[in-house]
Amino acid sequence: MRPICRCFKLVHHGEPLVDTQEPLREPAAGEVVVRILAAGVCHSDVMIYDGFVDTGGGHKLDLSRGIAAPRIPGHEIAGEVTELGAGVTGVKVGDKVVVYPWIGCGTCSYCVTDREPLCSAPRNLGVQRDGGFSQYVIVPDAKYLIPAGSLPLEQAAPYACSGLTAYAALKKLAPMHPDETVLIIGAGGVGLSGVRFSRHVLGIAPIVADIDAQKWPLAMDAGAVRTIDPSDPDAGKALVKATGGGVHAVVDFVGTGASFAFGFGALRKGGKLVSVGLIGGSTPIIPAVVVFKAVTIMGSMVGTCGELRELLEIAQTGVLPPLPVKALPLDAVNDVLHRLHEGRFPGRAVLTP
């Protein structure tokens, strides 16, 4: 008799996830069953729920075609190994693990060089394959399971996306001189991870910009040197003056037209802007300004499996401040998605199936 698995499925975009109970299938050869003990809820889960990304000007990028509903969302997963398919090595039943969810086809040039997030035939957990808003998840290969070690699983799960996304974005700015300045835009779940990692990855305590003053204390606790309100019409000029010509680097974890424009305007000559957030919108970019300021603009999604291993090894040392998480039961998922949609969830929500 197979275990009954409770999960919450996306059946129709924009409608509440459906509470479902069904038998857990047996793992095929090479697969691993993980009992989920912690599952973070990410803003990208909100976009998957909506089925689109706002690209500004009334336009939308359709995400629904890449998600074969019904689908169990959720990609920040930590738990315990409970079953092994035939031929599985490297893990054993009872291991506490963090699951790397950004899985590619396994055979293209990106996949064989540990760049699976760039694969054009992804098998991402919570997107193309069932994910973490469930009591169990089936992982296609043990190589995507990383030991959680002594980390509390509620802290460990968000490393698979919010932590990894922030870590990979900051690595794109390294190395930096300790006297240089970094601006992080956004103090939500991913942005706070960036604040936490900045001193370790770059050796610099960042300035943090967020329109929500209630998030400023969280940013300061995570390691920010100061906080500013980017919606203040004088904030940009004041920042450029205070930094002697602008900041050396910006990471935009928000991804609106306004946040991108603020970050671009804050750059000094030769600066770098890493765009990460996907909230939506657009803003004009003047090519001549890019040339005259000699700035670099780059996009960054999630990181690689190797980078997640690096990050978890760093976290094991205890040098990273803890992420403010709120543990909630699995059946709170629809409420959490609603609150995230409205920007009313500080820190990180973690479901505990």
Image (tube, helix red, strand yellow):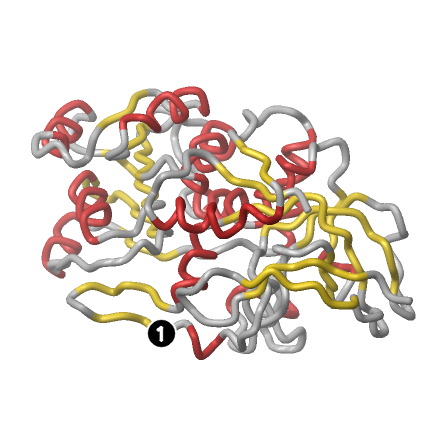
Front residue of 170 and 244: 170
Residue 170 in the image: x percent, y percent?
Answer: 44, 42
Residue 30 in the image: x percent, y percent?
Answer: 83, 69
For residue 198, side relative to residue 290 (left or right)? right
Front residue of 303 and 132: 132
Instruction: Count the numbered circles shown.
Output: 1
Quadrant housing residue 84: bottom right
Q: Does any portion of residue 115 appear in the rendered image? A: no
Compared to 137, does 309 lie above or below? above
Q: Which residue position is annotated with label 1?
A: 62
Front residue of 120 and 19: 19
Q: Amino acid at mark 1?
A: Asp
Q: Residue at x 80, y 70 (%)?
A: 25
Q: Residue at x 62, y 48 (%)?
A: 330
Q: Does any portion of residue 172 appear in the rendered image? A: yes
Helix, strand or loop for disc 1: strand
Residue 286 in the image: x percent, y percent?
Answer: 11, 59
Compared to 232, does 133 lie above or below? below
For residue 336, side relative to residue 179 (left or right)? right
Q: Quadrant of the N terminus?
A: bottom right
Residue 151 in the image: x percent, y percent?
Answer: 70, 33
For residue 143, side relative to residue 17 (left or right)? right
Crowd band around label 1 with a 10 angstrom C-alpha radius: few (<14), some (14–19), many (20+): some
Front residue of 128 and 292: 128
Q: Residue at x 54, y 54 (%)?
A: 303
Quadrant housing residue 24: bottom right
